[in-house]
Amino acid sequence: MLSSSLEDYIEAIAVLAGDSGYVHASTISEYLSVKKSSVTAALKNLKKHNLIVYQPYKPIKLTLLGQERAIEILQRHTVLRDFFVHVLQIEMEQANLAACKIEHAIGADITEKLVDFVRDFKKREIYMRHRGRNFCNHCGVHKGRCRLSDAECSKMMKISHIHGDEAYIRRLSCMGILCGKRIAILRRHGKRGAMLIQAGDSKFAMDAGLYDTIEVEEEQ
């Protein structure tokens, strides 16, 4: 079992890695506000667990196992943040800070229950927002578009519509999710589980309650 500190490093690598999937140790040091010697020690530990590809003075990359672990960690953060924002009505910045402090203390069983709760809560919100609106009767999505969840992995798409009220759309914009933004699914975690998403230069986990509200279309 990884310590909360090592989980922070995995999360940082997942967030900071660019299109190539690589990130430099100095970037991790700056992002986490820790000494380079501490980063080196953590990277050696992560390599022992087969979670990263690492050689001294070379960029770092998550292994497939590391990517799966990163999705789990990011999902815990996402579901906690969404619980604070959507259920408790806490501001996004404060919710993110709280999620960072709590995410390492809960196990998979609690995370799963929170995922189900927040997903059901969002579905009720979405239903109430869009009851009576003019959607395609077959799939609930405007023609020429698809839900983000139905998009192909690694295919860059453009966000064409976000279902939600002004406050909901504003919250998503704080995460870098807004109409016209380029977005892609990097990795899926189960059929309806969290997905690792790239929106612009940012990477984060997104659950079904969120990605079901986003419509995308191919870039022209």
Image: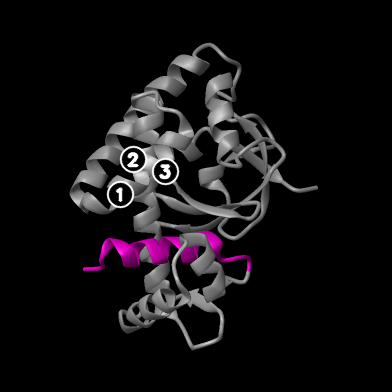
Q: In the rendered image, which quarter is residue 37 located in? A: bottom left
Does the CB distance between marks 2 and 3 fall below 8 Å?
no
For residue 39, which numbered disc appears in the image? none
Q: CA distance from mark 1 to mark 2?
A: 7 Å
> Looking at the image, which is closer to me, 115 or 22?
22
Residue that badge 3 annotates: 207
Which residue is at a point 55% across and 41% down the rendered structure image?
175
Q: Is residue 17 magenta?
A: yes
Q: Which span is picked out in magenta?
A: 1-19
Does the CB distance between marks 1 and 2 fall below 8 Å?
yes
Determine whether, in the image, residue 115 is placed left or right of residue 33: left
Q: Position of residue 162 (x, y in %)?
A: 60, 30
Q: CA distance from mark 2 to mark 3?
A: 11 Å
Q: Say few, some or many: other residues with alpha carbon within 10 Å of mark 1 (under 14 / 14 to 19 / 20 or more).
A: many
Which residue is at a point 50% across and 40% down the rendered structure image?
211
Residue 2 appearing in the image: yes
Residue that badge 1 annotates: 103
